[in-house]
Amino acid sequence: RALTDRTVHTLRYPRVPAPRQDGPCSLRDPGEYLVLLVDGPSREVATVSFEDDRGKGALAVEVAGTLIVATHVSGDQRRTRQLARLAELAATPPGHAAVLLGDFNTDRATVASALGTGFAVADLPSDALPTRPHPSGSASPWIDHVVVRGAGVSSAAVESADGLSDHNLVRATITM
């Protein structure tokens, strides 16, 4: 509500997540969303709630001839079908670019391999903060990515969210 000069595009997932703590939820709306805030003209192209995980999906918006896709992908074997769907969604006409960003719940190499040729995943510095800080374990600490098709991506970095989220922020420079 405070960003009256921006267009807000949203996808509200069909499921409502269970609270991680006992007791009443302090949120006005406990729903889960994908959100894109856009400065300037934009047009919603698609909202996709993945059939095999109703709490994951994609929100696609066209901004200045570029397709921007916010996504949240499952962290298990369902990921393969979901990444294939994202590749289809980002198959823009020649001369148009696509940018995919969000929580892919897997490492960079897996995302790059699953999306296929024509996609480039931003390479984070080796000393980057984890995108999803968690206690040590088998999962990759870098599961949030910026991916481009028909554009360049550089200067990727991870910025601390100072505990305001369970993920840190990923930023990158996109060149057309």
Image (cartoon, rainbow, N blue to C red):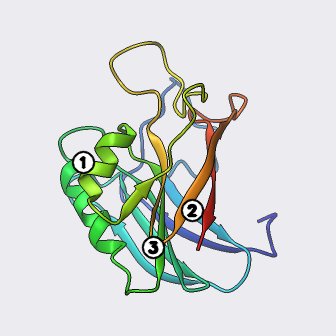
Can residue 74 be seen in the rendering of this structure?
no
Q: Nearer the viewer, residue 135 or 98?
A: 98
* Residue 135 locus on image (x, y percent): 48, 14
Hey, what amino acid is under mark 1? Arg
Q: Are the residues at dot 2 and dot 1 in contact (C-beta closer than 8 Å)?
A: no
Circle 3 is placed at which residue position? 150
For the C terminus, the image quarter is: bottom right
Tell me which numbered mark, 3 or 2, is placed earlier along the sequence.
2
Tell me which numbered mark, 1 or 3, is placed earlier along the sequence.
1
Element type at mark 2: strand
Element type at mark 1: helix
Q: Name the residue rendered at 30%, 66% in the picture.
A: 87
Circle 1 is placed at which residue position? 79
* Residue 37 locus on image (x, y percent): 66, 67
Q: Which mark is residue 9?
A: none
Which circle, 2 or 1, is nearer the viewer? 1
Q: CA distance from mark 1 to mark 3?
A: 23 Å
Hey, what amino acid is under mark 3? Gly
* Residue 54 locus on image (x, y percent): 30, 55
Quarter of the rendering containing residue 50 = bottom left
Q: Nearer the viewer, residue 87 or 127?
A: 127
Q: Name the residue rendered at 20%, 47% in the picture.
A: 78
Circle 2 is placed at which residue position? 35
